[in-house]
Image (cartoon, grey):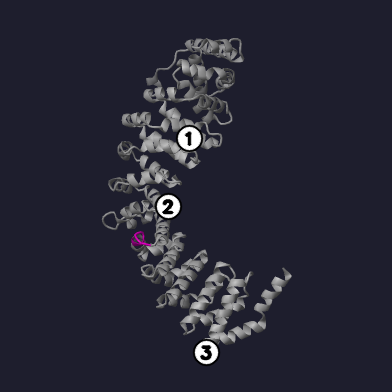
Amino acid sequence: MHQHIYDEAQLLNQTTLQTLNRLATSENAELQMTAAMYYLHLSHHFKTPLPDASMEPVMSLLLSTDLDVQKTISLSLVNLLIKNNVCKELVLEMGMLVPILDLFQSGDANARCNSCACVVMLASSESNREAIMVDGIIPLLALSKSYDPQVQQNATWALLHLTQSDCSTRILCEAGAIPVLILLLQSSDSEVQFYSCTALCNIAAAQEHHPKLLSHGGHFLLKSLLTLMSSSVQKNSTQACRCLHILSKNVLIQEQRMDLDCVLPLKALLKTSSPESAVTLLSALSAHPPNNDVLVSEGMLDEIGLLLHHRRSSSVIIEHSCKIITALCSSCTGQQAAIDSQSLSGLLRALASPTLSDETLLHVTSCLHHLMTWDPLKSKMSVTIKSEQVSGLVKLSGQIQNPPLSYNSAAIISKLEMTGEIVQLLRPHYVTMLDYLLVFLKKKDPKFQQLGIVTIFLLKKDEDFSSVLAHSELEVQLWEMHAQTEETRRLLQMIQPLSPSSVNP
């Protein structure tokens, strides 16, 4: 380690720096190249930050009249910036941005690539972006239209970095970056597509830019994003989906997107190994009621059912699937589609998963509880539910430390049709159920008390439950509640209650 530090110190000692300065300021291109090659060597092997004084020769070499020298030193600077060997702020303070931007105009593709890469690295520093914006945007936009793929890639990459702050994004939009980025979505280069789409995602995050994003005739942005959703490059299709989701906050975009038929590419994305972006977009679409008839008719509940049956369903997929199912089942057509699909069994499958967080389980139980307010779905659930899912609901009902999850789970059980099959599934859990029902009855919240009473009423239809209930603490609590209720009713009869009209004239 000590030898490594010593070697680096020798590479840029005072004598070496003086020699590099003389070479860099020489009018001899060969001597300048010697200095540039030395910096290229440093950029590959130096591990620690360079001293500030070492940057003076770099500035001189960038101003060289020899293109090969400029290419070599600009490549060296890219490497040093990537490795954080030099301070980005110092590069700008020394005025290096001007010769770097001048390289944009070079007829050499490598020189333009290096200059773009330098701008990208410099723009990664928030404090540098404003300085880069002043002189760099127009050349970058011009280079992003280059016919050279590498130049176009680097220019688009630089533009992407400039969309990472609100201030620079606003300036970019005013300079006309949006139509350029939209056109780049149709590039034949997948990296350019990805960079431009990500930049548009960043721009779309602020709704103030939506009018400009949508001002290009014929829904050009939406058409381009929908085309990109069908890309064979998954990161591009995913990013296009993400961009559409961000834009979905705009109601006009919701309507336009359905008019342009985004369902087919969505279906394809739901079948990929990473369907999160697609299910998130579908969730946003289903939250807009006018879309739901189309989504149901296009079989989206079938797709969601298949997705929930996938072994690797993540929390994001499950939570958004719950929102989609709830939204699409708001009509009779949607309810029938849910009955015909695997969406209900998929929700029940998720319910039995041992790895889901309480937050995700809350989404699942809320969705199931909501669905069971409709008789056809309640009947379907009662014949679909299995032993392990009943066990899961009983266990969740006992999670008193999470009242919403406990309530939802117990409410689902209370809505099951007490057929012989359901009674057989519940019998092994009667003792456990007595415990959470007792807690419910003791709660001050009447919602829990009422749910407890309804559940007991249903379960008492089975003699086995009545036997377990007899002489239990739960039965004692029921008698106490009955006595208290009777006493309250007697006391209320002693007073003449005010009529509603006198209370609220």
Going from N to C along the chain, the mark reached first, 3 or 2, is 3
Question: Front-most of 350 and 397?
Answer: 350
Q: Secondary structure at mark 1?
A: helix
Q: Secondary structure at mark 3?
A: loop
Q: Is disc 3 in contact with disc 1, using a CB cutoff of under 8 Å?
A: no
Going from N to C along the chain, the mark reached first, 3 or 1, is 3
Q: Position of residue 427 (x, y in %)?
A: 54, 17
Q: Position of residue 170 (x, y in %)?
A: 40, 61
Say which amino acid is labelled 2.
Answer: Gln
Residue position for label 3: 28
Q: Secondary structure at mark 2?
A: helix
**Residue 14 visible in this rendered orientation of the protein:** yes
Q: CA distance from mark 1 to mark 2?
A: 28 Å
Q: CA distance from mark 3 to mark 2?
A: 51 Å
Among the 4 quarters of the image, the one containing residue 79: bottom right
Number of numbered tags placed on the structure image: 3
Q: Main secondary structure of the magenta part?
A: loop
**For residue 323, above or below residue 132:** above
Say which amino acid is labelled 3.
Answer: Asn
Region of the chain picked out in magenta, as a range: 183-188
Q: Position of residue 222 (x, y in %)?
A: 32, 53
Question: Front-most of 388 and 378?
Answer: 388
Residue 210 in the figure: left or right of residue 385:
left
Residue position for label 2: 234
